[in-house]
Image (spheres, rainbow, N blue to C red):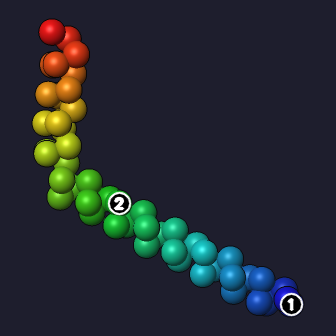
Amino acid sequence: MTGSERGQGMVEYALILVLIAVVVIVVLIVLGNQVQNVFCNISGAIGQ
C-alpha cells in the first residue's frame, strides 16, 4: 500500500466517523425529550 492509498483510507475512515457522529446527533435531537423522560423516570424510581 502506497502513501497515497494509506491517506485515502484514513480520509474514508474519517468520513465514516463524521457520518456516524452526525447520525447520532440527529437521533439525540429528535429523541432528546423522550430519552430525558426515560432517565427522569429511572432516577425517580431509584430515589423512591
Q: CA distance from mark 2 to mark 1?
A: 33 Å
Q: Residue at x 51, y 75 (%)?
A: 16
Residue drawn at (77%, 83%) of the image: 6
Residue plotted at (86% across, 90% down): 2
Q: Check the image and report above or below for 22 versus 1.
A: above
Quadrant in the picture for residue 12: bottom right
Q: Position of residue 44 (x, y in %)?
A: 15, 19
> How many residues crowd mark 2 within 10 Å: few (<14), some (14–19), many (20+)?
few
Dot 1: what SS?
loop
Image quarter in which the N terminus is found: bottom right
Q: Amino acid at mark 2?
A: Val
Circle 2: element type: helix
Quadrant of the snapshot with the C terminus: top left
Instruction: Tell me if residue 28 comes above or below residue 42 in the rendering.
Output: below
Residue 28 lies, with reference to residue 37, above or below; the image says below
Crowding at mark 1 (Cα within 10 Å: few <14, some 14-19, many 20+):
few
Residue 44, numbered label: none
Residue 17 in picture, x, y percent from top left:
52, 68
Percent position of residue 32, x then y: 19, 48
- Residue 24, disc: 2
* Percent x, y of residue 42: 20, 26
* Marks 2 and 1, the one that precedes in the sequence: 1
Q: Residue at x 14, y 28 (%)?
A: 41
Residue furthest toward the top? 48
Type of amino acid under label 1? Thr
Question: On the image, which quarter does residue 21 sit in?
Answer: bottom left
In the drawing, what numbered circle is on residue 2?
1
Q: Is residue 3 left or right of residue 21?
A: right
